[in-house]
Image: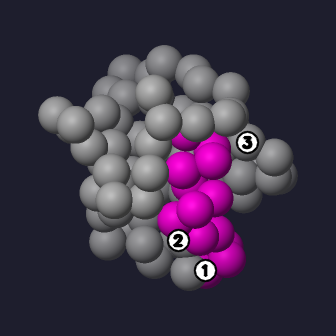
Amino acid sequence: MVVAKQDLLITKHAADKMIIEGITSHQVCDAINKGSRFEQTDGYLSVYTYFSVAWKKFMNKYKIKTVFLNK
């Protein structure tokens, strides 16, 4: 599985958080592709370097629910 920028469905909340935290869509792809993945109740959490991405696979797309810095 290789996630590319065009495979992302970014929610408004996630887009707002990406702007606030300074995280790009390319970094979100890296987190899903290379980060540690943890299964959650409704999707996955990928932890990568200094941030995490909560996402869910939706058909052939990846719905990005939120992003946050690891503190």
Q: Amino acid at mark 1?
A: Ile
Q: Which mark is residue 20?
A: 1
Q: Is residue 28 magenta?
A: yes
Provide the residue designation for mark 2: 17
Q: Main secondary structure of the magenta part?
A: helix
- Residue 6 on image: x %, y %: 34, 59
The correct choice, above or below, for 38 with respect to 61 in the image is above
- Check disc 2: other Cα within 10 Å, few if <14, some if 14-19, many if 20+: some
Question: Is label 2 in a helix, a strand or a loop?
Answer: helix
Q: Is residue 6 magenta?
A: no
- Residue 18 on image: x %, y %: 55, 71
Res 13 → quadrant: bottom left
Res 45 → quadrant: top right
- Check disc 3: other Cα within 10 Å, few if <14, some if 14-19, many if 20+: many
Left or right of 66 on screen, residue 65: left
The correct choice, above or below, for 56 with respect to 27 in the image is above
- Residue 37 on image: x %, y %: 59, 25
In-front residue for pair 6/32? 6
Q: Amino acid at mark 3?
A: Tyr
- Residue 27 on image: x %, y %: 63, 59
How far, Cα to Cα, is label 3 from label 2?
Answer: 16 Å
Magenta residues?
Answer: 20-32
Q: Earlier in the sequence, mark 3 or mark 1?
A: 1
Q: Which mark is residue 48?
A: 3
- Check disc 1: other Cα within 10 Å, few if <14, some if 14-19, many if 20+: few
Residue mark closest to the camera, 3 vs 1 = 3
